[in-house]
Amino acid sequence: MTKTTVSLDLIEKTSADALIKHGAAPWIAAEVAKAVRKAEATGNLICGLYYLESYCTQLASGRVNGTVDPVVSKPKPASVLVDAKLGFAQPAFAKGLSTALETAHDMGTASFAVAHSHTCTSLGYFTEQIADAGLIGLGFTNASAVVSPPGGNKAVLGTNPMALSVPAKQGGLAFQFDQSTSAIALGKITMAAAAGEDIPLGWAVDEHGTPTTDPKAALKGSLVSTGGYKGWGFGLMVEVLAAALTGSVNSLDVKGLKLPDGPPHDLGQFYFLVDPTTFAGDAFYDRLARVSDAVAEQEGARLPGSQRVLPSEVSIDATLWENTQKLAQA
């Protein structure tokens, strides 16, 4: 695989140009491009340029609305709702974030729902913005059904990720995690299938419910939950919060997220914002430091997402970058 080095500034600009070329309003394209940039900067390749062609194709087909203005409302004093109106999740989140932050600072906590949106891809991108504002951010979203229940062979849940971002006392991020409740992200299976590589046992089952190392058999079958019944329980929790609570679609009723056309995703995301000093004041940071110090004193160990320094440029697949440039010139 030939690699090429590209600046993150250029990745963001080219991504925005591609989205605009395919029908997105400039401000909406800018919000989505920021998320693509962050994904590439953090090595989250599945949510970066790898996803851009799908965004553009679905803009052209009308599967996602690239011009709609999200609508922000407050159903209750500590609750913020954004109706994405079948548009992108990134601009919908951006439209409601200031209201959600203000509400959480005033009330101590806030629930923040984004309803009827396109896939948000990386949840940590959103919860980190909450932590950057000094609040704990907890996020949930669902996706098209690819995960079968333990002992089953038919998909019921999506990969249904959840993310937690915790602020540092002096500002910025103390740590965060962003993980699917499935054993692996579906993109890892599709990438293995495209490369002709086996997958580890424990990632998926075939159409008969038998564990498999063949990614093509896995794509005909289903993924499994991480940790068996425990992961399945977390997946169900995410489904309730992201789909039922927001009034968005169940994982069972979403067609493949990267299919070029078809019904809009109509997915939901749910975020819970917490002022970390509401109950214990600065004792929160003392307890956080106790854990952080215990991890840091162990050589080779660190809290997830901590001590991260983002680069100004990244090395990416040359063919992927060539295709990205073509999308921007279409």
Image: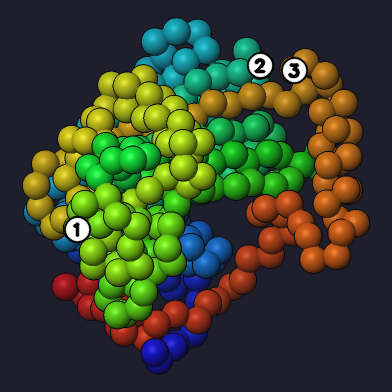
Which dot marks residue 220?
A: 1
Percent x, y of residue 168: 76, 42
The answer to which of 283 and 17 lies nearer the viewer is 283
Tell me the mark number nearer the camera, choosing from 2 and 1: 1
Q: Identify the residue at image location x=52%, y=12%.
A: 78
Quadrant position of residue 206: bottom left
In which quadrant will I find the N terminus? Answer: bottom left
Mark sitting earlier along the chain (2/3): 2
Q: CA distance from mark 2 to mark 3?
A: 6 Å
In which quadrant will I find the C terminus? Answer: bottom left
Percent x, y of residue 222: 28, 51
299 left or right of 55 in image: right
154 left or right of 172 in image: left
- According to the picture, the residue beneath numbered tag 2 turns out to be 108
Indicate whether 260 appears above or below 170.
Answer: below
Indicate whether 117 appears above or below 321.
Answer: above
> Label 2 neighbourhood size at 10 Å, few (<14), some (14-19), many (20+)?
some
107 left or right of 24 in image: right
Mark sitting earlier along the chain (2/1): 2
Q: Identify the residue at image location x=82%, y=28%.
A: 284
- Residue type, label 3: Thr
Q: Identify the residue at image location x=9%, y=47%.
A: 262
Mark 2 element type: loop
> Label 3 neighbourhood size at 10 Å, few (<14), some (14-19), many (20+)?
few
Say if mark 2 contacts mark 3, CB within 8 Å.
Answer: yes
- According to the picture, the residue beneath numbered tag 3 turns out to be 278
